[in-house]
């Protein structure tokens, strides 16, 4: 009996020590980014957050060109928050390629172990800044993405059909000129990715931005819709060496400042 009570007591203490979202189901935990307000800003404060297992983050409000009727959450000013590093790493591990084109729920709680939700809504991760050497996540930028808002999104381009592409089967080379395309998107209609089909493409073919099938509500933020996304070359282009670039520049009278 004593042993049983000790076991129950230990489980209760563990549950009480864990943040509320850690006690939620795994599916719920991965559908919502959990955050708490961040009162201090600056390099030292951010370094301390990272040392304590958290990631400094900022949630952007509605910009002047956002458009639409934003909700109260979306109309709020810029929010400085801190997120749990472990959760962000897990989210990136599961959806790294499309993390910044996938809206997700955000809950801002009163404290690390508080059940009080100060603000919640849908956000779009905009940028994940990492340390160049270690790859460690330094900070996270998000923006409110509530219904009625428009956001500028760099949508990833995914190439499919490479294994059956006639041009590539002949030994050609897929020259990817754009791996992301920027669109102005309604928050409720943000595409996770664009797919470019190479199934019937041959050597010499080019695929242009205007050939991508997109929802009419999306607006391409490019001055030239005829810009190619990719082309199939007969051979892989040879990259110019620094010496060749310098010689070419000198030939047209361009010198270093």
Image (cartoon, rainbow, N blue to C red):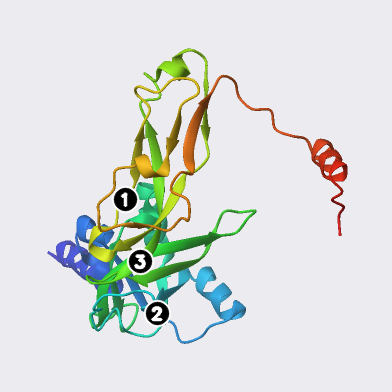
Residue in the image at 41% along x and 82% along y: 78
Residue 131, above or below 250: below
Which of label 1 and label 2 is nearer to you?
2
Closer to the chain start, of discs 1 and 2, is: 2
- CB-based contact (under 8 Å), mark 1 and mark 2: no
Residue in the image at 40% along x and 69% along y: 142
Residue in the image at 53% along x and 62% along y: 129
Task: State the image coordinates of residue 149 (x, y, percent, origin top left).
Answer: 28, 71
How far is the residue under mark 3 from the one under mark 1? Answer: 13 Å
Q: Which mark is residue 192?
A: 1
Please indicate whether residue 155 sits to the left or right of residue 215 in the image: right
Q: In front: 124, or 14?
A: 124
SS class of the residue under badge 1? loop
Q: Which residue is mark 2?
A: 64
Residue in the image at 19% along x and 59% along y: 25
SS class of the residue under badge 2? loop
Which of label 3 and label 1 is nearer to you?
3
SS class of the residue under badge 3? strand
Q: Which residue is mark 3?
A: 151
């Amino acid at each position: 009996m004593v042993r049983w009570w000790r076991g129950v007591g230990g489980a209760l203490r563990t549950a009480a020590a864990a943040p509320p979202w850690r006690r939620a189901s795994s599916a719920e935990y991965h559908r919502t980014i959990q955050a708490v307000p961040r009162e201090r800003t600056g390099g030292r404060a951010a370094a301390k957050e990272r040392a304590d297992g958290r990631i400094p983050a900022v949630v952007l409000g509605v910009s002047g060109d956002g458009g639409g009727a934003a909700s109260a959450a979306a109309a709020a000013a810029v929010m400085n928050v801190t997120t749990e590093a472990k959760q962000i790493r897990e989210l990136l591990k599961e959806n790294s390629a499309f993390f910044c084109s996938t809206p997700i729920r955000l809950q801002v709680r009163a404290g690390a172990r508080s059940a009080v939700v100060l603000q919640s809504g849908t956000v779009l991760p905009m940028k994940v800044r990492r340390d160049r050497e270690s790859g460690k996540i330094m900070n996270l930028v998000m923006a409110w993405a509530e219904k009625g808002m428009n956001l500028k999104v760099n949508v990833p381009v995914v190439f499919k059909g490479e294994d059956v592409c006639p041009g590539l089967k002949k030994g050609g080379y897929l020259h990817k000129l754009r791996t992301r395309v920027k669109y102005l998107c309604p928050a409720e209609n943000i595409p996770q990715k664009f797919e470019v089909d190479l199934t019937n493409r041959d050597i010499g073919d080019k695929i242009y931005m205007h050939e991508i099938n997109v929802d009419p509500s999306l607006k391409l933020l490019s001055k030239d819709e005829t810009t190619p996304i990719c082309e199939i070359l007969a051979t892989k282009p040879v990259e110019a060496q620094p010496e060749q670039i310098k010689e070419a520049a000198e030939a047209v009278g361009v010198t270093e400042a």
